[in-house]
Amino acid sequence: MNRFTKVIFDGKPKKIKETSCRGSVLVEFAVCMPLLIVLLFYIYDLIKIRRYYSQTNFIGRQIANIIQNISRGRGASELKITQNDLKYALCFANLSLLPGTTMYTQDEHYLGYTTWVQVYRVVGDGSGNAKCTSRIELSAWNGQKSPEKVWYACTSGNHVGSKVRYSSEAVPPSQIYSALKVGSGGNTEEKIVIDVCLLTDSTIRPAGKSTEKQILGLHQAMPPFLTNGDDKLHFYFHSVTIFTPRNRLFSDSCPPEPET
């Protein structure tokens, strides 16, 4: 067995004690192992958080793509996006995150979270400033929920769960969203801003999952979130998609109801 002798000098060498190197290594290993496990879980959480952000970003891009293409083939008088068009776009885009019910329980809250989508129509005034003309809220707890049952509201004003700020007055576009830009020089450019995030509700907990860490599958790290006044709703993993819509695709205010 390897041994070492600790020596101090106070005028004369003095032997303190002999200790096992192997025992010292085992002690250090026992101390470091819990820290290593915590570090591994933390790295795992960071990877999973990044994946959540990628998923909400993909959903926003899917919705934008569907909106741009959904009216192709319609007559000139039917180009405008309707409420049902937006509901169908959400249902299709949700399938990349919320799986269908064929392999899962019919309980619409089975995951403990869902997507919360807000669609803003923003119009430039030609001088480089812009204003919002409408804000649309969309949500469906079940990935396979039929479009007619999707939560839909067309409104105005700010929402506590959004990274985008609503302004009915012309303001610099960065006040609406940091990355938003509109044309100037008389160009009244139109933009659609889609804010996608994951929503959890403290009153909705799937079986066996009592905390949001468990619901999100995390162990050590928790991402930042926005919340409403009573801390009941939490909004995670915001991703914002901005695009210029096809001409005459959106109404000046709220999308019309589909004709029957």
Image: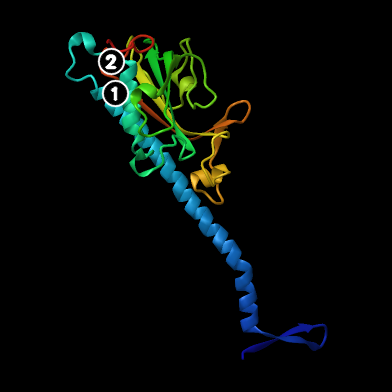
Q: Position of residue 96 (x, y in %)?
A: 34, 38
Distance (Cα) linking label 2 and label 1 = 9 Å
Within the image, what quadrant is residue 102 found in? top left
Query: SS of the residue at dot 2?
Result: loop
How many other residues sit within 10 Å of disc 1, few (<14), some (14-19) or many (≥20)?
many
Most extreme residue toward the bottom is 1
- 47 vs 150, nearest the viewer: 150
Query: Are discs 2 and 1 less than 8 Å apart at CB?
Result: yes
**Residue linked to disc 1:** 67
What's the residue type where badge 2 is placed?
A: Leu
Taking 58 as reference, is 158 above or below it? above
Q: Position of residue 62 (x, y in %)?
A: 31, 32
Look at the image and tell me whether residue 244 can be seen.
Answer: no
Taking 101 as reference, is 17 above or below it? below
* Badge 2 or badge 1: first in the primary sequence: 1
Q: Position of residue 247 (x, y in %)?
A: 25, 14
Please identify the quadrant where the C terminus is shown: top left
- 162 vs 139, nearest the viewer: 139
- 139 vs 203, nearest the viewer: 203
Q: Position of residue 191 (x, y in %)?
A: 35, 19
203 lies left or right of 255: right
What's the residue type where badge 1 is placed?
A: Ile
Q: Which mark is residue 249?
A: 2
- Colour convention of the picture: rainbow
Taking 15 as reference, is 209 above or below it? above
